[in-house]
Amino acid sequence: MSVVRVRFAPSPTGALHAGNLRTALFNLLYARNKGGKFILRIEDTDAEKSDLGQEKKMMNTLRQLGLGWDEGPDVGGPYGPYRQSERKNRYADALETLIAKGAAYPCFCTPRELEQDRRTLISQNKPPRYLGRCRNLSEGERKEREKAGAVPSFRFLVEGAKIEFTDGVRGKVHFKTADIGDFVLTRSNGEAVYYLASAVDDIDMKITDVIRGEDHLSNTPKQLLIMRALGKAPPKYHHLSIILGMDGQKLSKRADSADIGTLLVKGYQPEAINTALAMLGWSGVNGKEALSIEAMAEKFDLSKVSKSPSSFDPARLEYINSKAIKKLSSAEFLKIIRPILEEGLFPFDKFSEAKLNKIMDAVRDSIHSPIEAIHHARQFVEPGKPDKKAEEILAGQGAKETIGAFKKTVAQMDNIGGDSLDAVIKSLTSQTGLKGKELFLLVRIALTGRSTGPKLKDLFDTLGRDEILTRIENRLNNY
């Protein structure tokens, strides 16, 4: 039985988003589950749009997520090069083979002619395709056009009624060749188009399984035709469902909300991101905790991947990320969060190492996403300006009297710590009749000015009696 070989083949034209990173993840999980190889291939045949800087960013994002590859442009391998711009001779060889077999022919059609044909077909409610204007040119006619200075592209000669294959996610799939038409293999400048380059690369790199997005489904019959014409067995194909944003629209490569590299910079944990991505179509994870690559690979099963669209939900990612963050030590959390706190001008030098660790523990246990860290951490430094909800509560009937009772209760206590919270709440309930969320929220606002933040127990434990009294007095003075 052959070794499983899969590939992730991005184009370096933009940031990696949830859709193509889900593809990379599923390829890696499948390879690891089967004891196979995961190959990174850069599809940079479009010289105008490809960007070496973007390529480096993509590779860095993959590494940060733990999606390392066994073969690729930087690590090499037995079937390289792994960058399409370095494989042009292979595409030229393949084209010559197809021409020799009568499977490819030169096309001299102008862009204007092709556009006119496209519009005609659309007006007839037919799918746009090549109408075969140059398909049956004689050798003499071809030479005559070349002599006149025309430089041809080359097209694949599509024959037969239909193309069928079994997709690992979708089952039996078939396409009518009449709807495909003779497609371009190389442009007039000699540059190979996606269909030819990808098919040749998959053959040369001995790819056994192609796992990719549903948007590539229509490319498959063309690649199958090329491979068969070259006399090579095709890989198995598995087309994943599309991923939608919460607005129901397909995720764009340039949609900031789905730019995973940006999420990493903001401090989101790789395990949380990977787990959230794995939930996009695979039923093997439940999202209750962040899982490692190894844990997911052990049970990964392509037969449990759905063909129905999935939605990328930022709230789900934040929940899973909160679970991942809570696993971090104080030092690990501070290392991740320090850049965000420094940007927010958090006064590190104001606290001893022991107290800073205590604050970090409290912040770590109270946030869902790293961006919340500065908002929560600053509450240990000074109370903030009341948010809208806090203003409404402070203006409510009996709020000032309850805060006054809070001051009186704390003043009567010799020391205040995290274990003092229950006694304070019990006393305030007795004095005011308030209890539960309503009372807890007012106590929080009295101390921080905010309606959300770290646990009250952590605030009590870190602030201490004197700071708590000072904050309560300042809050009362602002009435």
Image (cartoon, rainbow, N blue to C red):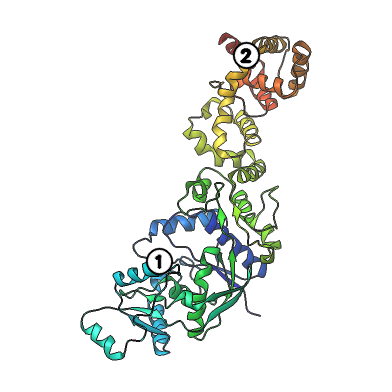
Q: Which residue is mark 1?
A: 123
Judging depth in this view, the residue of 128 and 3 nearest the camera is: 128
**Sequence order check: which comes first, mark 2 or mark 1?**
1
In percent of the image, x 72 and y 11: which residue is there?
409
In percent of the image, x 79 and y 13: which residue is there?
430
Mark 1: which secondary structure?
helix
x, y (%) of residue 5? 58, 72
Q: Quadrant of residue 38?
A: bottom right
**Quadrant of image for the N terminus:** bottom right
Name, please, the residue furthest toward the left.
Answer: 148
Image: 164 above or below 442: below
Q: Quadrant of residue 323?
A: top right
Marks 2 and 1 close (CB-CB < 8 Å)? no
Image: 355 above or below 442: below
Q: Amino acid at mark 1?
A: Ser
Judging depth in this view, the residue of 109 and 456 nearest the camera is: 109
In percent of the image, x 64 and y 29: which residue is there?
454
In percent of the image, x 37 and y 66: which residue is there?
46
Name, please, the residue furthest toward the front.
Answer: 124
Would you say 144 lies left or right of 11 here? left
Residue 418 in view (yes/no): yes
Q: Amino acid at mark 2?
A: Ile
Image: 30 above or below 447: below
Judging depth in this view, the residue of 361 and 289 nearest the camera is: 289
x, y (%) of residue 363? 62, 33
Mark 2: which secondary structure?
helix
Residue 79 in view (yes/no): no
x, y (%) of residue 48? 34, 62
Q: Which residue is mark 2?
A: 472
Q: Residues within 10 Å of mark 1 (few under 14, many from 20)?
A: few
- Label 2 and label 1: CA atoms lie apart by 74 Å
